[in-house]
Amino acid sequence: MNIQLENTITAIVTHDREKVQSGFAPIFYSNNEEESEKLALFIAKITLGMVHNLENGVYVVVKH
Amino acid sequence: MDTFISYFMTSVFVGTIGRVYLLRVDYRQYPSYPRGVIMHLTFGLIGAALGAIAIPALIHKDYAAVTFLALAAEQFRNIRTMERENLTNIEEIELVQRGKSYIEEIAKIFEARNYIVVLSSLTTSALLYYFNNKYLAIFAGILVLIILKYIMKGEKIQDIANVRIGKIWFKNTLLYVDDVVIMNVGLKEARERILKTGVAVVLEPVDENASITLSNIGQRQAIIHDAVAQVGIKKDLDEPDFTPLARRNIDNGNVMIIFYPSIKNEKALLRAVKYAPVLESTRRSPSESGAAYKKEEAK
């Protein structure tokens, strides 16, 4: 059987440790916004997810 | 006996010709050629034979043979199931899915076409036995075919909505088409690519009925699938950002669809959307109801 999680956050990427501290999805910390974007892109490609930007320095990867 | 054979063959011929007439292999490539086509032609032939046998069976007082028609109905329901299963199986691996409503619609049409074949060969054989005139019977059989085909013809999107190109723009990370938010796009490159390759289509429903029909998710998916089948798509499996999306303006019922066509021709895209089918199962007419439009209560 093939079970997939859909419309849930697969990963959270941020450079601001204040904004995200815990959650059920893995959190990836980066050093700056550019690195966040790059990390988010990589994770999205690996998980076939889509990158969303919460416009506060936090990127989430969601599989739709 | 010879008359029987000749009448039978004539009716079967008219029915089978009907199936050929109803079978079109076009841009949708469905039924698939050549195997799918052969399959449906054979089913058409069997249907025509069942229609042709009913009247002579009645004349020979063989009432049990009429139950063949019930058998035919059962057989054609199987065609519907077969089509549904077939399309559902390949749905998973489609880049842009048809959606359940569209699959149901296609399956239903395939079943209905076989009934048309049965009815036309039944008409032909009935008239053959009644008037004993081949030309008249063939003519009537073909007339039944044409009339039923005309009745079966569904509406197109252009009948229920005005279709035009919409404006794509971004407010920070939010993708807009005209005044409706489509989605949040996180990556800068994706935003640039959307602006470069995206084409938005706006469907403006002509009335309340059309508005509710267009709000159906299956209907929207069918439009997307049909249009993508014609103009292509610039997207791969790992790029969900470039999935065509339809969103609705809740105030006026306009539906915005964003496409990433590989053939970048706005006219072609507009035409594809205009000619997409209005699905029978999604069509609603609230204006017929008394509740919504305060029709006078029946006295």
Image (spheres, coloured by chain):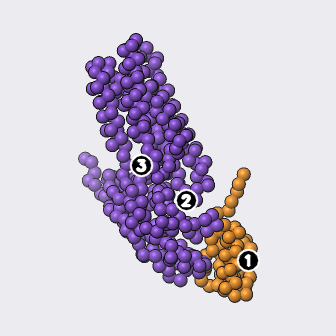
- The local crowd at label 2, few if under 14, some if 14 to 19, many if 20 or more residues have their Cα within 10 Å, is many
Q: Nearer the viewer, mark 3 or mark 2?
A: 2
- The local crowd at label 3, few if under 14, some if 14 to 19, many if 20 or more residues have their Cα within 10 Å, is some
| Residue ID for mark 1 | A27
Measure the alpha-carbon separation of dots 3 and 2.
Answer: 21 Å
Residue A18 place in picture, x, y as percent: 71, 86
The mark found on residue A6 in the picture is none
Q: Residue at x 51, y 62 (%)?
A: B232
Residue B256 place in picture, x, y as percent: 44, 68
| Residue ID for mark 2 | B96
Q: Residue at x 34, y 27 (%)?
A: B123
**Callout 2: chain:** B
Measure the alpha-carbon separation of dots 3 and 1.
Answer: 47 Å
Q: Residue at x 37, y 65 (%)?
A: B163
Up-down: is B171 above or below B122? below
Secondary-structure class at tag 1: strand
Q: Are marks 2 and 1 on the same chain?
A: no
| Residue ID for mark 3 | B280
Give amino acid for label 3: Glu
Name the residue at the front extreme: B34
Q: In the shown orientation, is residue B130 left or right of residue A30?
A: left
Chain coloured purple in this rendering:
B
Foreground: B244 or B73? B244
Secondary-structure class at tag 2: loop
Colour in which the image shows chain A? orange
Residue B114 place in picture, x, y as percent: 44, 35
